[in-house]
Image (tube, grey):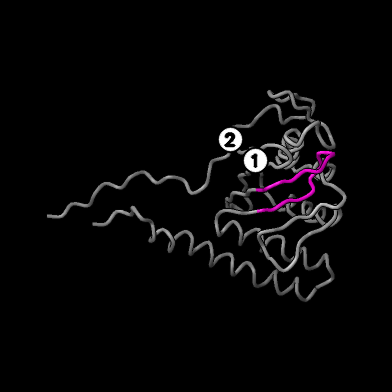
């Protein structure tokens, strides 16, 4: 008689958000001596830390104060264009912050003028991870940012959430209406595929 092997405990697909760090609160000093204040820090590392704190609080003004005037941001949504300048990137951040349930960072590594920061977030009940490669100028402001999002459903959710607002912001009402109708359908399909279909490809999936 065949006996089904015991299933091992499933590991979470995404890194869990860390416990709340009190040094994130206004007026508090971080354990590494960085100061939570608007504008760039005394180094790229401190500016990256301030960026993480601003994102965690969804503080748009603090985040924009860390951007260089000629900042360039590449999103994971498309390779057909990029966001250039503080105004464009700030508008994108404003839309993103307004759609998130929370955003909490778990990784900040790098050296010199380049840092990699990782966030754990949730929107409309769907969790995702976001990683940014940040390059800083001589004033320790963000000059260049490349964004990557992990889980497919998280990426689809972000696109369907901010896509219509981006289209409307750039005066494409018909495109915004089409996106508002079509993108949620695509998102639900991607979520279903990631939840039910892709797990079948797990290398160590137990079989009877």
Whichever of labels 2 and 1 marks the residue nearer the N terminus, that label is 2
Residue 44 among magenta residues: no
User: In the figure, is residue 128 to the left or right of 175?
Assistant: left
Q: Are the two marked residues, 2 and 1, in contact with CB atoms closer than 8 angstroms?
A: yes
Q: Which mark is residue 122?
A: none
In the rendered image, residue 88, in percent from the top left (x then y), is placed at 83, 57
Which circle marks residue 104 in the picture?
1
- In depth, the one of 14 and 185 nearer the eye is 14
Locate the C terminus by quadrant.
Answer: bottom left
| Residue sitting at x 82%, y 55% | 91
* SS of the residue under disc 2: loop
Asked if residue 156 lies left or right of residue 141, the reply is left
Identify residue for label 2: 18
User: Does the magenta stretch mainly form a helix, a strand or a loop?
Assistant: strand
Left or right: 111, with 194 as reference point: right
Residue visible at 72% across and 60% down in the picture:
162
Left or right: 135 as drawn, with respect to 189: right
Magenta highlight on residue 145 = yes
Question: How many residues crowd around disc 1 within 10 Å: few (fewer than 14), some, or many (20 or more)?
Answer: many
Which residue sits furthest left?
A: 1
Q: Secondary structure at mark 1?
A: strand
> At 66% from the left edge and 44% from the top edge, which residue is drawn?
103
Looking at the picture, how far across and down is residue 93, in whole percent? 77, 52
Range of the magenta residues? 132-147
Task: Please state the total of marks drawn on the protein image.
Answer: 2
- Residue 180's x, y, as percent? 70, 69
Residue 122, x across and y down, in percent = 62, 49
């Amino acid at each position: 008689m065949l006996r089904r092997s015991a299933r091992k405990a499933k590991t979470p697909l995404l890194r869990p958000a860390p416990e709340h760090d009190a040094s994130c609160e206004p007026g508090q000093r971080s354990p590494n001596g960085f100061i939570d204040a608007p504008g760039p820090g005394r180094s790229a590392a401190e500016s990256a830390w301030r960026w993480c704190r601003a994102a965690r609080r969804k503080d748009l003004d603090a985040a924009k104060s860390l951007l260089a005037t000629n900042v360039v941001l590449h999103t994971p949504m498309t390779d057909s264009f990029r966001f250039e300048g503080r105004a464009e990137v700030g508008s994108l951040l404003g839309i993103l912050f307004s759609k998130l349930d929370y955003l909490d960072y778990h990784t900040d590594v790098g050296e010199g003028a380049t840092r990699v920061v990782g966030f754990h977030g949730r929107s409309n009940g769907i969790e995702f991870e976001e990683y940014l490669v940040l390059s800083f100028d001589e004033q320790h402001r963000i000059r260049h940012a490349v964004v990557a999002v992990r889980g497919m459903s998280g990426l689809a959710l972000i696109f369907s959430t901010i896509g219509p607002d981006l289209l409307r912001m750039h005066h494409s009402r018909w495109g915004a209406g089409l996106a508002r109708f079509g993108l949620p359908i695509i998102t639900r399909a991607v979520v279903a595929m990631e939840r039910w279909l892709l797990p079948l490809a797990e290398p160590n999936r137990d079989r009877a």
